[in-house]
Image: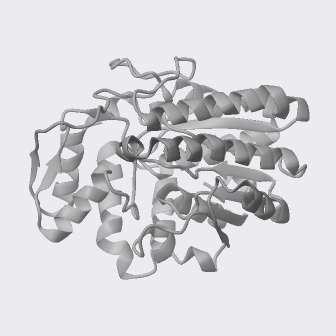
Amino acid sequence: MNFNGFYKDKKVLVTGHTGFKGSWLSICLLRAGAKVCGYALPPRTEQDNFVVSKLTKRMEHHEGDIRDQAQFLSVFSAFKPEIVFHLAAQPLVRCSYEHPAETFSTNVIGTVNVMDAIRAVPDCRTAVMVTSDKCYENQEWTWGYRETDRLGGHDPYSASKAAAEIAVSAYRRSFFRPEGKGIATARAGNVIGGGDWCPDRLIPDCIRALERGETITLRNPASTRPWQHVLEPLSGYLKLAAALHANAKEFDDAWNFGPDPAQVFTVQQVVELAVKKWGGGRCESIGGNFHHEAGLLALDISKARLKLGWSPVWNTPRAVEETVRWYHDARQGDAFDFCVRQIEDYEKGEK
């Protein structure tokens, strides 16, 4: 995760750094010696990993809406990053049904604002724009989607991520390649890990129920997802950015980061693993009319494995185990140190 010292003293800007993945990415970058600046909305709760890891004391922190072009450009121009990781987004499928316009404006216009800022600052040469595995037109295939498969989206969230991919592709061909800058998109699956308290996500919902002694309710227990610990895609993003920085023409493309095919578990199986690690609990399936959600979803990671030399490290049971361990133990001390210890365990490469 140190990438042979590549990130040491590099100026790196992370959008969405107060969020779940953004906070973990910031910790990875700080540990690697980078100078990190973040731009995001305030954290959702006082329990979020960003808060309990005390990241405001460890990095340059700016609060703002990614759709506010003038404010974002002001922060961006003052910091002059060499590398950008764009994670700021409206990240929830069910929320996108309730707030479709906000979802599209945040996920598409916000992405465009980041790319315009990159164009405006000559020092910035490299960017990884994080979208989603849900950007694909889901055909309920049993095999994984490849980067060349058709984009689409049944719900506003998925469609907004597909639209963001199209916007990045247009900017790449129209501006960044002629300017010699490298910009890539990263598509990751259902990410789990400590410090996520977002509503309508499986593990946070489980933890809330387990802490209250309530029954965990499952809408679609047989649905499969490419579950992975947060450190898996983050290691991919970091490796991709380093490769882009060295050779933009070779790596400025779309990339999947997900688990091995054998590690695609159902919702029910993941919950059972979490309950076992917690030490007890109950779950049940519930009926009712819900918004459309994909039943089958998996990613083909052959491209990242062959061209980037990236492979997942922790299998799904280990990912769930480490996630539950964070909720058990991290809040009892310095969460930043706990996250660093998990990163060190991840580096050992043990399944």
Taking the spot 12% from the left edge, 67% from the top edge, the residue there is: 213
Q: How many marks?
A: 0
Locate the N terminus by quadrant: bottom right
Residue 53 placed where, x, y %?
A: 50, 74
Does 22 appear above or below 313? below
Horizontal side, residue 215 vs residue 105: left or right: left
Residue 4 to residue 239: above or below: below
Quarter assignment of residue 14: bottom right
User: In the rendered view, would you say 137 is above or below 58?
Assistant: above
Q: Is residue 175 visible?
A: yes
Q: Residue at x 35, y 50 (%)?
A: 319
Residue 163, image x and y in percent? 58, 31
Colour basis = one colour
The picture quadrant where one finds residue 140 is top left
Name the side, left or right, on which 325 lies relative to 68: left
Residue located 35% across and 17% down the image: 141
User: Where is residue 126 drawn, in percent x and y?
Assistant: 77, 44
Taking depth in this image into account, of 71 and 188 the one nearest to the observer is 71
Find residue 302 and report its horizontal and vertical position in percent: 53, 24
Whether residue 309 appears in this view of the structure is no
Write the residue at 51% across / 67% down: 340
